Image (spheres, helix red, strand yellow):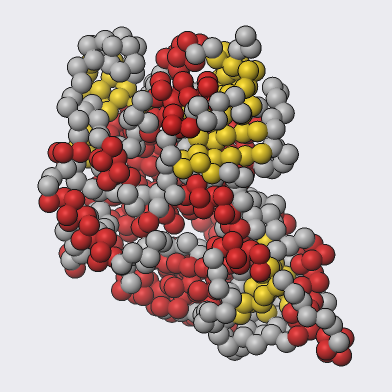
Amino acid sequence: MTPTPFQRVPWTSAVLLAALGAGTVRARRRLRAIPVLPVTPPAAAAGAPRAAGWRLLTARGVEPDAPTFLAARAHAEAEGLRVLDLLPADLPAERALSLLRLVDPGRYRQDRLAAGRGAGFAVLVTEEVLSRAGVDPAGPRPDTAELLALTRRLKEYAADATGLAIAPGLSCGGAGEPGGPARAAELRAQGLPPGALAAVQLGGLALLAGVAVRQGRWGAAAAGLYWLQPYLALGGPGSPLRPAGLGRATAARPVRSLGAGLRTAAAAGRDAGPDPAADGAPEASRAAAYRQDLAAGVGRFLEPRREGCPWCGSDRLTVRVRVPDLLQGKPGRFTLEQCGDCGHVFQNPRLTPEGLDFYYRDFYDGRGGEGAGTVFGRLGAAYRGRAEMLLPHADPASWLDVGTGHGHFCNAARDVWPQTRFDGLDMGEGVREAERRGWVETGYLGQFPEFASKLAGQYEVVSMYHYLEHTREPLAELDAAATVLTPGGFLAIELPDPESRMARLLGPVWLPWFQPQHQHLMPAANLREALADRGLTVIAEEHGPAHQGNDFFGAVALAATRLAPDPDRPWGPGPTPRARLLGHAVRVASLPCFAAAAALDTVRTAVARRTDGGNAYRMLARKDVP
């Protein structure tokens, strides 16, 4: 049988051609979706009034003129924007392609959880946003990396009022393509891992070179498409950008990309230490505080083991899993036991309040705050699903989100409930930041039961999304929710499901065990009964839609952390060359494992949706009207 033309195409080349072609078309489409500022004549700019209430922040070496400033302000005011990142017309090709990979201009403004992105050369901001964000516009002029980090922060304070625009009269001041330390710093400023991205870039180049040599004209076509991509995406008549040296950048792309990837990887390896902590505390002081805590041992952070189930009182207890701290690698070992009568799973012995403070420290704030914020910012689909669960049942005017953290859910839920007042409650200082960002109207700092009498009968909806499992006394939390709700109000809860099959398959590396933070994991039947005891009737329950697609990916991440903890963690023994080398080796070796895990999670999520079974569940209960 004569092979068809399709059968003669090597599959690797076919995949690369499809991916590169789609990426090129996407970049060209996105570029044309970015608005272009009109060119304001200098004479008109000279006679225009001062733009009160606005500041134009620029990187060192960038000198915008008055017409650009006025055109940007007019565009921002017409579009209702409060933050506007300006792209210089001569933005270098690889910088432009990188930005277009990260940002879809058609969705960027509407996506309230999208990370703030820009070119890193000029940002127009209202003084009101700068004030809430605590930014002094009179401070030293930032470099490109610092301005990228600032843009990311400002988007949080103007979640649905941040945009991009091309400024024809703006030049990037001769800045070329970044490489080495500069590129690594810019990636970190955007919350991206420079080492991993450099490894992916170098691996991609090696793959392209391999197919070009081994797979004939189809491999050469794939390599050629990569080579020509800058001109195909950014060049040609009608392009709103005029990248400096586009022809040279296109001709030399493979060589430049190889050099940039090698320099970035080297810089990432040299600068593997932690970034400055979000709260400004010196890393040395942080390490000294941990040494003082650990000097007395971690055994004092555990209470005596209890003999009975905290849910039903039964003494039929068996060990479900024993694990160390796989989240941060802090010293200690933790046991989850399961009740043989009601199935309740709980930490036994449980942490003391001081122990919880120790193990939570630097996870959601401080040293780990940026990483936690990045993870929460990627859960937009989950947040929307939680908010939409209420659509058939109510149109609430007031909503209290308990355990709100920095308010990510409340911020995202405004797309579903734009007229609802969202308040938040949490034990961490992040709730104050949520209030400053405008993600919640009022932020309550403290324990929920302490606020129950003060807030009695004030809310039509109370939500507890992945909150109850963190609490020491979940039944007391349910009592508080019943008190705070108005008659006929709704309580929305989402929890890990300890009855998930993946819990037994993955054992200690099943992510929802989340030790040592999770204190209680309740089967759905137990929660339904507890709600009924408090005058709350379950009207909706979801399992598949609540599934979090991270079973396999989370297992690989926890295993990698176990094999090679962060050598710079301030509670660890201190970095050594051997620890750093081990960390690099584990990260490289785990890349294919992460890729396989992501594929397995995709399949697992599809199955969970179809079978209404997953690793979590949601319940919506209505408070009975007397």
Which residue occupies 20% across, 30% down? 303
Which residue occupies 60% across, 48% down? 439
Task: Give residue 574's quadrant in the image.
Answer: bottom left
Which residue occupies 29% across, 65% down? 283
Q: Position of residue 141 (x, y in %)?
A: 54, 82
Q: Position of residue 329 (x, y in %)?
A: 25, 48
Taking the image as shown, residue 105 lies to the left or right of residue 608, namely: right
Number of numbered markers: 0
Q: Nearer the viewer, residue 582 or 71?
A: 71
Taking the image as shown, residue 59 lies to the left or right of residue 268, namely: right
Taking the image as shown, residue 500 lies to the left or right of residue 536, namely: left
Q: Position of residue 388 (x, y in %)?
A: 65, 32
Furthest residue in direction left, as rendered: 296
Q: Nearer the viewer, residue 65 or 534?
A: 534
Answer above or below: position of 458 versus 515: above
Answer above or below: position of 145 versus 155: below
- Report the quarter where the N terminus lies: top right
Q: Position of residue 589 (x, y in %)?
A: 31, 55
* Res 619 seen here: no
Task: Give residue 379's quadrant in the image.
Answer: top right
- Report the quarter where the C terminus lies: top right
* Res 433 seen here: yes
Which residue occupies 46% across, 43% down? 445
